[in-house]
Image: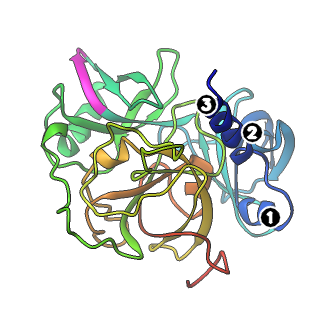
């Protein structure tokens, strides 16, 4: 393996190392991993970010469980992947079971299924779209044809990811027709737009972000063929820190850029969770980071402000 690739691999492993100290406490609002055991009042998870350490999370009657929609304790089966957002005192506020997401460019459509190119980092996905879900998906994505974009929230099934609802809406244009910002357009200090999350049904289980404008030059880690997106953004490198604020809930956190957001750059949609955001996906977060910032994984997005770098404080106002 070339020296440059070895350096990148080592750097990526360092980014994925389990946080320690105060940083770990700040990120502990959401955890992700595999269910080891569950009872009506306690969930035991092998946490991915702590190399399989057992985390015991109290539950109550108010704990909301998602498994393809509204779920219950029966969905908490050992072996299933989960994302858990905790409230004060460490109690489970919301649990998403076996949730995943498929977003990218449609390659082929068949009877009840779609083949999707999710970008150079994520490969391809064969996603099943049941008849009961097809109608809502077509409302958001009226052109289920090769060359158009698809974004669906999925649940794991024996046959692979199964769509349960559309992600955010997407205008009906081909990927090749995306209009880039004017070359002279000023790059704002703060980026405003849509924050989404990424990950297959197995999930990306570490805090981190996929950023649509990673520099493709040198060792920055960008994709040479990534589109410029529909919003002007400053170029960053893999390993850079960005601070993401959920404008719908007010939570903010600093996360590392762990991937070039080639797929996010192709989407020029809005999030309407609390207001209509400006067009453009400005960040994709890993599931735990998204949930920790107050996002609902099933809803798929929140209105966000992103700043390169880390502010002095992680919570509350900037």
| Contact (Cβ within 8 Å) of mark 3 with mark 1 | no
Judge by depth and name the residue closer to the eye, 77 or 245.
Answer: 245
Local SS, label 3: helix
Residue with the mark numbered 2: 48
- Estimate the spatial distance between the alpha carbons at disc 3 and disc 2, rounded to whole Å: 25 Å
Instruction: Mark 2: give few (<14), some (14-19) or many (20+) Cα within 10 Å.
Output: some
Q: Main secondary structure of the magenta part?
A: strand
- Estimate the spatial distance between the alpha carbons at disc 2 and disc 1, rounded to whole Å: 16 Å
Instruction: Mark 3: give few (<14), some (14-19) or many (20+) Cα within 10 Å.
Output: few
The vertical placement of 27 against 187, above or below, is: above
Q: Residue at x 27, y 68 (%)?
A: 278
Point out residue 5 in the picture as x, y percentages from the top left corner.
61, 31
The vertical placement of 61 against 143, above or below, is: below
| Residue 90 position by quadrant | bottom right
Point out residue 130 in the picture as x, y percentages from the top left corner.
32, 25
Judge by depth and name the residue closer to the eye, 65 or 309.
Answer: 309
Residue with the mark numbered 1: 25
Residue with the mark numbered 3: 5
The vertical placement of 160 against 317, above or below, is: above
**Residue 107 belongs to magenta span:** yes
């Amino acid at each position: 393996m070339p020296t440059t690739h070895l350096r990148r691999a080592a750097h990526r492993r360092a980014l994925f190392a389990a946080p320690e100290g105060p940083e770990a406490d700040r990120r502990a609002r959401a955890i992700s991993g595999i269910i080891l055991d569950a009872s009506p009042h306690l969930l035991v998870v092998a946490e991915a970010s702590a190399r399989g350490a057992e985390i015991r999370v109290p539950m109550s009657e108010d704990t909301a469980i998602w498994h393809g929609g509204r779920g219950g304790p029966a969905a908490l089966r050992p072996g299933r992947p989960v994302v858990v957002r905790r409230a004060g005192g460490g109690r489970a506020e919301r649990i998403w079971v076996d949730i995943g997401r498929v977003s990218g460019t449609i390659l082929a459509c068949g009877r009840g299924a779609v083949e999707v190119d999710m970008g150079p980092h994520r490969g391809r996905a064969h996603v099943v779209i049941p008849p009961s879900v097809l109608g809502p998906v077509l409302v958001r994505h009226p052109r289920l044809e090769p060359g158009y974009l698809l974004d669906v929230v999925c649940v794991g099934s024996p046959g692979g990811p199964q769509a349960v609802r559309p992600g955010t809406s997407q205008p009906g244009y081909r990927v090749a027709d995306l209009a880039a910002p004017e070359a002279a357009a000023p790059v704002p200090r703060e980026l405003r737009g849509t924050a989404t999350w990424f990950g297959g049904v197995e999930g990306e289980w570490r805090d981190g972000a996929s950023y649509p404008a990673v520099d493709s030059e040198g060792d920055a880690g960008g994709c040479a063929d990534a589109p410029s997106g529909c919003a002007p953004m400053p170029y960053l490198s893999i390993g850079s820190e960005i601070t993401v604020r959920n404008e719908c809930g007010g939570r903010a956190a600093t996360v590392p850029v762990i991937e070039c957001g080639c797929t996010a750059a192709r989407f020029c949609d809005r999030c309407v969770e609390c207001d209509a955001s400006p067009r453009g996906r400005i960040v994709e977060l890993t599931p735990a980071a998204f949930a920790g910032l107050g996002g609902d994984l099933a809803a798929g997005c929140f209105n966000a402000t992103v700043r390169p770098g880390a502010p002095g404080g992680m919570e509350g106002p900037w």
